[in-house]
Image (tube, rainbow, N blue to C red):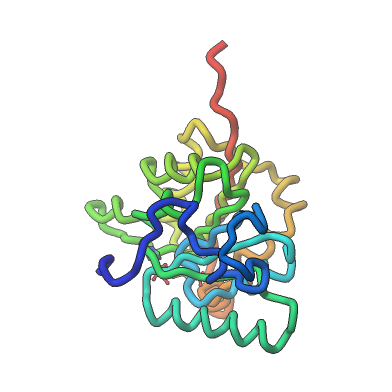
């Protein structure tokens, strides 16, 4: 249960020295004002983070995962990569947490530039839709932690869930869909179906995927 993992009181309590020790060697918070910008929600085994780490070497990123063993695996994976490639993978970390409850404890208003929801659990039954990681209510929270221009990436192999995520995002006043041209031009979009363990499994089985990628926008003015 949630009581088994610590939760920072606020984003300023997130221990950067623990997550990024080479970049934040001293607990003195003044040494760097750099903050986490990418969050992979329900990161699973961490495949996306590993790809993003070298694609955006200057950007701090974190995976959020609720399963203890899986989180430990990702920690070990990152440590092994750091050892094998000195100087690399210093910008990536993982935390065990319930992202549906604690996102605002980790990120302040407008802090993030990308959030990822790759192959989230489908929760098929109507009464379980409230457990979905994309919902009208949670989108309010994601809109809060994303800066204007920030992007939410979602993908699933479950058609019904794909339609649900697309519809939630479309109906939210603070998100707009990327155009086909923008999707083409974004190198991250290509990773969505190929970088994670779940994506690779779906691809191996020749499964279809459903993507929704939306940008955080300013509130529409009622002028
Ligand atoms: N994104 C990864 C991928 O594409 O390979 C993992 C996909 S897996 C189907 C969904 C993941 O979300 C699982 O690892 C699960 O433990 C995690 N998860 C589910 N609910 C969560 C929550 N409330 N907070 C954090 N992680 C959660």
Query: Which of the 4 quarters of the picture holds residue 66?
Result: bottom left
Q: Quadrant of the N terminus?
A: bottom left
Instruction: State which quadrant residue 49 falls in.
Output: bottom right
**Quadrant of picture, ligand 1:** bottom left
Query: Seen in the image, is 215 located left or right of residue 57?
Result: left
Q: Residue furthest top?
A: 223
Residue 182 picture location, percent across and down? 73, 46
What residue lies at 51% left-to-right and 74% top-to-bottom? Answer: 198
Q: Position of residue 5 (x, y in %)?
A: 33, 69
Q: Residue furthest left?
A: 127
Question: Residue 72: horizontal and vertical position, in percent?
Answer: 45, 81
Task: Write the residue at 26% across / 56% down.
Answer: 128
Identify the residue shown where x is 50% and y is 46%. 108
Q: Relative to 211, does residue 75 appear above or below in the rendering?
A: below
Q: Nearer the viewer, residue 23 or 170?
A: 23
The image shows a total of numbered marks equal to: 0
Q: Is residue 71 visible?
A: yes
Compared with 27, 34 (above or below) is: above
Q: Return the residue nearer the eye: 16 or 135.
A: 16
Residue 31, percent from left and from top: 66, 58
**In the drawing, does residue 187 fall left or right of residue 164?**
right
Q: Nearer the viewer, residue 30 or 173?
A: 30
Taking the image as drawn, is residue 210 in sight?
no
- Please state, as top left, top right, bottom left or bottom right, where the C terminus lies in the image: top right
User: In the image, 22: left or right of 140?
Assistant: right
């Amino acid at each position: 249960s949630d009581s088994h993992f610590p939760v920072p009181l606020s984003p300023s309590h997130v221990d950067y020295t623990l997550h990024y020790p080479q970049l934040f060697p001293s607990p003195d918070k003044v040494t760097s004002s750099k903050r986490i910008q990418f969050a992979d929600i329900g990161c699973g085994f961490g495949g996306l983070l590993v790809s993003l780490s070298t694609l955006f070497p200057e950007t701090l990123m974190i995976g959020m995962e609720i399963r203890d063993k899986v989180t430990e695996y990702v920690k070990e994976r990152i440590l092994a990569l750091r050892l094998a490639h000195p100087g690399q993978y210093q910008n990536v970390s993982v935390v065990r947490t319930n992202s549906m409850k604690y996102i605002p404890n980790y990120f302040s208003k407008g802090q993030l530039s990308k959030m990822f929801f790759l192959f989230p659990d489908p929760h098929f039954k109507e009464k379980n839709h409230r457990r979905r990681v994309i919902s009208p209510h949670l989108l309010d929270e994601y809109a809060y932690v994303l800066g204007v221009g920030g992007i939410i990436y979602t993908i699933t192999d479950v058609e019904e869930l794909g339609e649900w995520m697309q519809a939630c995002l479309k109906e939210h006043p603070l998100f707009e869909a990327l155009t086909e041209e923008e999707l083409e031009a974004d190198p991250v979009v290509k990773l969505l179906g190929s970088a994670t363990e779940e994506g690779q499994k779906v691809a191996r089985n020749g499964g279809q995927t459903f993507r929704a990628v939306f940008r955080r926008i300013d509130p529409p003015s009622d002028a």
